[in-house]
Image (tube, coloured by chain):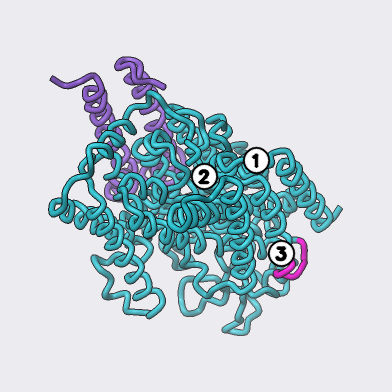
Amino acid sequence: MNVITYTYLFVALTFAIYIFIAIRTRAKSTKDYYVANSGVHPILNGMATAADWMSASAFISLPGLIGFFGYGGSVYLLGATGGFVVLSLLIAPYLRKFGKYTVPDFVGDRYYSNKARFIAVICALFISFTYLAGQMRGVGIVFSRFLEVNINTGVFIGAAIVFFYAVLGGMKGITYTQIAQYIVLLTAFITPCIFISIMLTNQMIPSFGLGSTLNDGSGVYLLDKLDGLHQELGFSEYTTGGKSKIEMFAIIATMMIGTAGLPHVIVRFFTVPKVSDARKSGGYALFFIALMFLAIPAIGAFSKYILIETVSNQHYIDMPSWFKTWEEIGLITFTDLNQDGIIQYTNSNNNELFVDSDIIFLATSEMAKLPNWVIALVASGGLAAALSTAAGLLLVISTSIAHDLFKKQINHKLSEQQELMIARIASAFSIGVGIYFGIYPPSFVAETTTLAFSIAASAFFPIIFLGIFYKKMNSQGAIAGMLTGMIFSVSYIIYFKFLDADPETYLFGISPQGIGIVGMTLNFIVALSVVRFFPPPSQEIQLLVEDMRYPKGTNKPLNH
Amino acid sequence: MLSNNQKYWKENIKYLTILLIAWAIVSFVIPVFFVESLNTIKIKGFKLGFWFAQQGSIISFLLIIIIYIYLINKLDKKYDVND
C-alpha cells in the first residue's frame, strides 16, 4: 500500500476511536462538563495532561528547531518540561484544594473581586485564542501535506471532530479522548525515532543512540561527526554555541513559569479526586511528556545529520521525490547561485538551500526511506497532538465565557442547564474562530506561543502564587500586579515583533521570547508594593487561604 | 506555640525551598551558566554539559517531583492532614 492509503486508514481509524469515546462520555452536569466530575485517576490525568500540553508545534516543529540550533535549542526542551516542577510543587495541589472550575474563578474568589475575575478572564481568553490559532494551522498543514486535500477542507474536518467531542462531552469527553490521543501521538513519534536510531547507530533507544558511534564503520560519535560537519559548512558547533546566556536564561524561565500559569494546563488538575492525586498527576504528566521529550533531541540530531548527508554538495537533479514535494509548497527552496547544479548548503552568502525547520520531522521519515506505514503514522500523530491541545483550549474558552463571564458577571441566577447550554454555544463559537484562524492564519502565528507564555508568566503566575503563599495579599495589589505584568509584556512584544524596533535596543539584551520573566518580576514588585497601602483581606478570606494549604477535607468542586 | 497546622506548613516550606533550589540548579546553573566547564568532561559521545541540557535536566525534574511527593505524603501523615 502507498503512503496515502495508509494515512487515510490511520486517520480514519483514530478519528473513529475519538468519536466512539465522545459518544460514551457525554457530559450531563456542569461539573461533568467543566472538570469531568473530579473523578479522573491520576495516571490517566497524567496522560491527558501530557497530550494537552504537547501541541502541534511540539510534535511537528520542535525536532527541527533542535536540529537547527543544536545546543541552543535546549531552551525549548528545558522550558517545556521544567514548568511541571513549579506546577506540581507550588500551584496544582493548592488550587485543587480550593476547588474551583477555572483560573479566573480562583482569582475572583481568592481576591474577592469581580474586577480581578474580569481581568483574569480577558487574559485567559487571550492566551487560549492565540494558542488555538497555532493548533488549527497545524491540523491544516498535516491534512494538506499527507492527505492531499485542500488546507481549508483539512481545517474543517479537524474542527468538526473537535466540535463533536468537546461540545458533547466537555471535560469528560476531552479527558478520555486526550488519553487515546496521547497513545497515538507517542507511538507515532517514537516509532520513526527507533527506526532511525537503529539505522544510524544500532541503538534501540533513541536517547542512547544520540550518544553512540555511527554504524557506517567510521567509529566516529554521531555528535562529533555533527560538530565537524557544522564547522565545515560554517555553522556554529552543534553541541555548543547559540544564544547568549542571559537570553537562554530568560527564555527557559519564561517558558517554565508560563507553563505553570497556562489555564488549559492548570484546569486539568481540577479533574482528579484528591489533593494528593493532583501532586501525583504532575509527576505522571512529566513522565509521559519525558518519554517523548527525551527522544526529541535524538531525532533532532539524526535528522540534521541525514539532511546534510542527503543534500549537501549533491546534484539537484538527483534529489528524491520528497524534496520536490516540499519544494512545491514552498517549504524547501533551492536557488542555484553559482549555476553548477550542485546544492551548496552553508552558513554564508553562498548558501543555496533554505529548509523550513517546521518540516524537518515530517520529512525525516521520508528522507530515511522508512516503510510507508511509519510515514502515515506520523501524520495521524501530528493530528492527535493538534486536536488534543485544541480541545483543551476550547474547554478553557467555553468555561471562561459561560462560568466566569455569564454566570459570575452578568446573571447569577443562571440554572445549571442554562449554564451548560451557554458553555456549549461558547464552545461552538470558539471553534468557528478556530476555523477562521486556520484558514486565514494571522501573519503572527509563529509569535503566538511567545505571547501566550509571556502573558501566562507575567499576568497569572505571580498572583496565583501570592494568593496561596501570602495570606495578606489583597485585591488591590493583585489587580495592580496583573495589569502591570500584562501591559508590560504585551507592549514589549508588540514594540519589537510588530513595529520592528531595533533588536539592539532590547532591554537587558532579552528578546520578546524571554520577556515574560521581566514582566513577572515587575508584577511581583508592583503587587507587593501596592498591597501595603490597602487593608488586608477579611478574616474569612484568610481562613480560606489557610484551608487551601492542608489537604485534609478536600471537597469535590461545589455546584455554584 | 505553633499549632499543628502551622508546623506542617513550616516544614512544607522548608522542603519546597530545598527542592526549588535543586530545580534552579538543573534548570539554569548546569545547562546554561556552567555548561562550558562541564563540556570538558566527556562520557561516551556526550559532552556532559550538552547531555544535561538535552537529557539530564529532564530526568532531574522528574526526580525532584518524585522526591517531593514522597516527602509531602510522609509529612501529611505525620501531622494528620492527609486527605
Tell me if residue A371 comes above or below residue A232 in the rendering. above
* Residue A417: image tag: none
Q: Is residue A368 visible?
A: no
At horizontal 28% and vertical 32% (from top left) the residue drawn is A546
Type of residue at label 1? Lys
Task: Name the colour assigned to chain B in the rendering.
Answer: purple
Q: Chain of mark 3?
A: A
Bounds of the magenta segment: A147-153
Label 1: which residue?
Answer: A28
Query: Cα distance, mark 1 to mark 3?
Result: 27 Å
**Do marks 1 and 3 both belong to one polypeptide chain?**
yes
Query: Cα distance, mark 3 to mark 2?
Result: 30 Å
Expressed as whole percent of the image width and height from the top left, the position of residue A233 reads 48, 67
Label 3: which residue?
Answer: A156
Classify residue A515 by image quadrant: bottom left
On whether residue A149 falls in the magenta region, the answer is yes
Tell me if residue A522 comes above or below residue A345 in the rendering. above
Q: Earlier in the sequence, mark 1 or mark 3?
A: 1
Label 2: which residue?
Answer: A293
Q: Residues within 10 Å of mark 1 (few under 14, many from 20)?
A: some
Q: Earlier in the sequence, mark 2 or mark 1?
A: 1
**Do marks 3 and 2 both belong to one polypeptide chain?**
yes
- Tag nearer the camera, 3 or 2: 3
Q: Is residue A93 visible?
A: yes
Type of residue at label 3? Phe
Classify residue A513 by image quadrant: bottom left
Q: Nearer the viewer, residue A85 or A542?
A: A542
On whether residue A215 falls in the magenta region, the answer is no
